[in-house]
Amino acid sequence: MRRLVRETDLQPAHLVYPLFVEAGLNGRTPIPSMPGQDRLGLDALADEARDLAALAIPAVLLFGLPPAKDERGSGAWASDGIVQQAARRLKDARPELLVFADVCLCEYTSHGHCGVMAPNGEVDNDATLPLLAETATSLAEAGCDVIAPSDMMDGRVATIRAALDGAGFSGTPILAYAAKFASAFYGPFREAAASAPAFGDRRGYQLDPANGRMALDEVLTDLAEGADMVMVKPALPYLDVLRQVRDAVDVPVAAYNVSGEYSMLMAAVQNGWLDEERAIDETLTAIRRAGADLVVTYHARQWAVRRR
Ligand code: PBG
């Protein structure tokens, strides 16, 4: 009876699994702040693609740890950049795996900010735009199926759309991290991706957690600039925003169940304070119920393993 009247379903087909790919690494190495998650070397990707296929997880979202960083983040758009290489490997191993590429400079800049710095020590929004466009084009050339800008510079969706179209990738969709809040819950990710800002914080370009209406405005702006799908991030503290976005737009809506949400739950599980299976199921189902079509989550793989 419960199955018959259930309103919300959760399938592997709804999940996107984030992967951290590290240059120079052989095999995999655990991420201490994210129990159960690893950084992967290029040589581990073919097996990973096969495992995810067996679990019917359709998509991954790639993050890179480059061999070196510089002021401008040039590793982000290098044709042999770490994510570019990873995308080629994954596509070779499993062409039907959907490869989403996160587009941002923070993993590639020596200062860890999401854009280049102006002389006054602030992020230079407009000088960053062409670099993001270059990065997006290079990722599409490497075979990435979806371009997902997370940098939060104003005007980046329009700039990236124009660049992709100009380079012959008019069929490559953009998933905009549209409502991305300046959140404490990105902490474990910044350790995993070695992308914490060396000074200051991201409040100059990410949303104030207090502002739900502004989040909706960001979503509409990104759609007007040409985004095909929009994301709300983090997920759990912003389920109200997710619902508002779902009600306001007809495009696919994604939610990012971020690193801090993952680590918080897993820490409690490790202490024996939460039932892992039920807690994850409830979490992901709630995100779907609030309106997410796609859920980006570090739980994806384990959830799918247990479900078999
Ligand atoms: C890059 C980026 C971040 C995350 C996704 N893309 C970090 C940040 O904005 O500081 C966070 C993801 C997570 O916490 O799981 N800008």
Image (cartoon, rainbow, N blue to C red):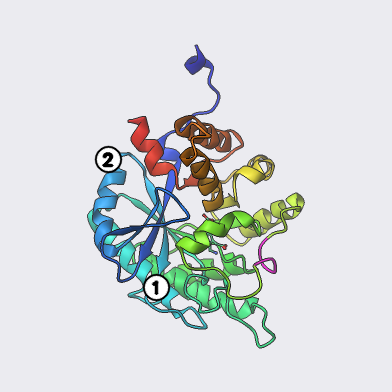
Quarter of the image where the C terminus is located: top left
Q: Which dot marks residue 206? A: none
Q: Nearer the viewer, residue 234 or 38?
A: 38
Could you tell me residue 241's position as x and y percent?
Answer: 68, 45
> Which type of secondary structure does the marked residue at label 1 adopt?
loop
* Location of mark 2 (residue): 54
Q: Amino acid at mark 1?
A: Pro
**Residue at mark 1:** 66
* Residue at image coords 63%, 75%: 199
Residues rendered magenta in the picture: 202-206
> Which of these two is toward me, 170 or 142?
142
**Residue 21 against residue 57 in the figure, above or below:** below
Mark 2–mark 1 Cα distance, whole angstroms, equals 29 Å
Magenta segment, prevailing SS (helix, strand or loop): loop
Amino acid type of the residue that numbered disc 2 sits on in the rendered structure:
Ala
Q: Is residue 205 magenta-colored?
A: yes
Q: Position of residue 182 (x, y in %)?
A: 66, 59
* Residue found farthest to the front: 271
- Residue at 53%, 28% (x, y): give it: 8
